[in-house]
Image (spheres, rainbow, N blue to C red):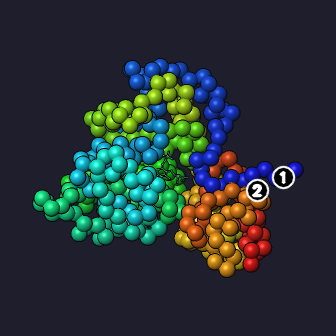
Amino acid sequence: MAAPLIDLRSDTVTRPTAAMRAAMAAAEVGDDVIDVDPTVERLQRLCAEMLGTEAAIYMPSGSMTNQIAIRLHCQPGDEFICEADCHIYNYEQAAFAQLSGVATRTVQGDAGVLHVDQLRDLIRPANDHMVRTRLVTLENTHNRGAGRIQPYENVVQICAWAESHGLRRHLDGARLFNAAVATGIPPADWSRHFDTVSVCFSKGLGAPVGSALAGPRELIQLARRHRKVFGGGMRQAGIIAAGALYALEHHIDRLGDDHATARILADAIRQSAGLRLDPEQVDTNMVIFRVDPALGTAADMVGALRERGVLVLATSPVKIRAVTHLDVDEAQVRRAGQIIQEVAEQMQ
Ligand code: TLP
């Protein structure tokens, strides 16, 4: 019989645990569009508390929280500044343009990390020729930066600079809890430099559905209106919110285990001929590595690994991403590392 798959494509692949499913089955629910769903309410309150904001709102996806944040902060004809490899720019179909009539200006970071000096000259002068610079977005941890944590000082400096120039600040914190666990800096300390913060429950936290957007009460009330027009008003959403609540209550501290297994995987890749970590630094639960063209393409290697029961994703013709999460234990990650080494060997 074939060995079971070791799925490292993303931390989004996790399935709810038996205890999480039990919490979901027992959830008290209501119609969250007509008035309130009590479980959604509890989730939103806990989220706001953890992020140190006045309010938070539950949404179906991280893409929606990001796009609604852009809608909140920008008008058509406005521009936001973001890092060139960020999720908002690369993986959301330029929804900011499609749905909100907003332009973007990208700045190349180092594994997703920006420094304030790169941004200082980017604010457009106010005249009738130019778009209006309105917002800066950051991503922490950074997905295409292989889970890189934004250095706290950089965040403080960028946000202080943006605020002093009247720019709004949004954090794509899909994996903010990974950054918090890895650094010991609490989520609320990261969050307080921003006007809005989005966090995802469906990534490393292991819940099946959903994200939250947190911020001042007035903005979050407006976000509720936007959520409806984006098609994100959900009725008895307490069923899925209960999974997210369970994740916040039980799955945050264990993110450190995923960071430890990612380091184990990184060590195996370092020892594989023809593979090179890129970036070399592994901060949290992701590794990205380059495949020497002498071995084949990233897609070739993804195919060969799939045949051996290891699932990973090609993020470019030469790069592969592997993500650790609560559905893969240390033994499976060690096994995956060994298979990666063997496959690289065979492709020589
Ligand atoms: N990331 C997914 C894919 O879309 C690439 C993944 O497998 O990592 N912000 C960040 C930083 C993300 O990594 C993601 C999802 C999102 C936002 C969007 O979340 P969803 O998928 O819930 O819309």
What x and y, as percent, mark residue 263? 63, 63
N-terminal of the pair, mark 1 or mark 2, is: 1
Q: CA distance from mark 1 to mark 2?
A: 8 Å
Q: Residue at x 26, y 56 (%)?
A: 79
- What residue is shown with label 2? 309
Q: Between 248 and 69, which is closer to the camera in this rendering? A: 69
Q: Which mark is residue 303?
A: none
In what element is the residue under mark 1?
loop
Q: Residue at x 29, y 67 (%)?
A: 119
Using residue 213 as the reference point, say whether residue 249 is left or right of it: right
Q: Position of residue 127 (x, y in %)?
A: 12, 60
Which residue carries the number 1 mark?
2
- Element under disc 2: loop
CB atoms at circles 1 and 2 under 8 Å apart? Answer: yes
Q: Is residue 30 above or below residue 286?
A: above
Q: Identify the residue shown where x is 41% and y is 43%.
A: 65
Quadrant of the frame with the C terminus? bottom right
Amino acid tagged 1:
Ala
